[in-house]
Image (tube, coloured by chain):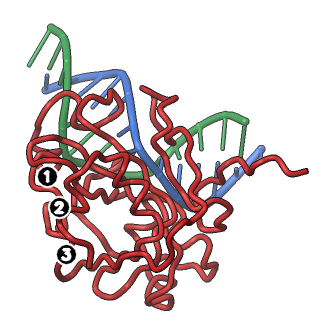
Chain colours: A red, B blue, C green
Amino acid sequence: MLPPAFFARDAVAVARDLVGVTLLVEGIGGVLVETEAYDRTDPASHSFAGRTARNAAMFGPPGRAYVYRSYGIHWCLNVVCGQEGGGSAVLLRALRPTHGLDVMRERRGLSDERALCSGPGRLTAALAVTIAHDGLPLDRPPFALLPREEDALPIATGPRIGISKAVEAPWRFGLAGSPFLSRRFPEPARA
DNA sequence: GGTATGATTGACT
DNA sequence: GTCAATCATACCA
């Protein structure tokens, strides 16, 4: 399980370090392959305009979940970062399914592993995350976060997806070349 | 009270 | 490539 201090850092640092971490909800989940950082000074962040009823969890203690409804249809899961009251978080966008594949397939009505959790809305659907999880600590049930087993993963960086402000900030992180991303990162030029 | 806008996805041309 | 689904929130009257 990750220590509390892991989350009490800049969202950008946490976002990078969450790639390769295993996320489980009720024992169902997999290895995170794509994340995005959002903080209080970021025009694209829900916390930019200050605390509201919706984003209250973002201003709570780090290491907890911030869940919101996206486009009226999907849930999106974030991990609160930094200091309490700081309003920063990391959006969990995609993971490689490793635990409970059958359950996820049934929830999503799909058989293709690559499509089960390759997007923030898909990830919450597969793991059955809803507003009921908003504000819950991620270091105890139903959540579990397990440290990554390898160091020196090939982590790619790029602009975030689906936003209209601060579109160039390179605060999206992911496992380079993974087939489980919501979108691929540009591959390095090959000789 | 009304209305515009998404940290998205899936279906369709 | 385009576009609708669907609703909480933010903002304005």
**Relative height, residue A62 to residue A114 (above, below):** above
Q: Residue at x 44, y 88 (%)?
A: A99
| Chain-order first, disc 3 or disc 1 | 1
| Chain-order first, disc 2 or disc 1 | 1
Instruction: Give the amino acid at mark 2.
Output: Asp
Q: Residue at x 19, y 62 (%)?
A: A5
The chain letter under disc 3 is A
Q: Secondary structure at mark 2?
A: loop
Q: Are marks 2 and 3 in contact (CB under 8 Å)?
A: no
Q: Are marks 2 and 1 in contact (CB under 8 Å)?
A: yes
Residue A31 in picture, x, y percent from top left: 47, 75
The chain letter under disc 1 is A
Residue A136 in picture, x, y percent from top left: 14, 67
Instruction: Give the amino acid at mark 1.
Output: Ala
Answer with left or right where residue A164 lies relative to residue C8: right
Residue A101 in picture, x, y percent from top left: 50, 88
| Chain-order first, disc 2 or disc 3 | 2
**Quadrant housing residue A64:** bottom left
Q: Looking at the image, is mark 3 or mark 1 nearer the viewer?
A: 3
Residue A183 in picture, x, y percent from top left: 62, 53
Residue at which label 2 appears: A134
Instruction: Give the amino acid at mark 3.
Output: Asp
Mark number displayed over residue A57? 1
Residue at which label 3 appears: A139
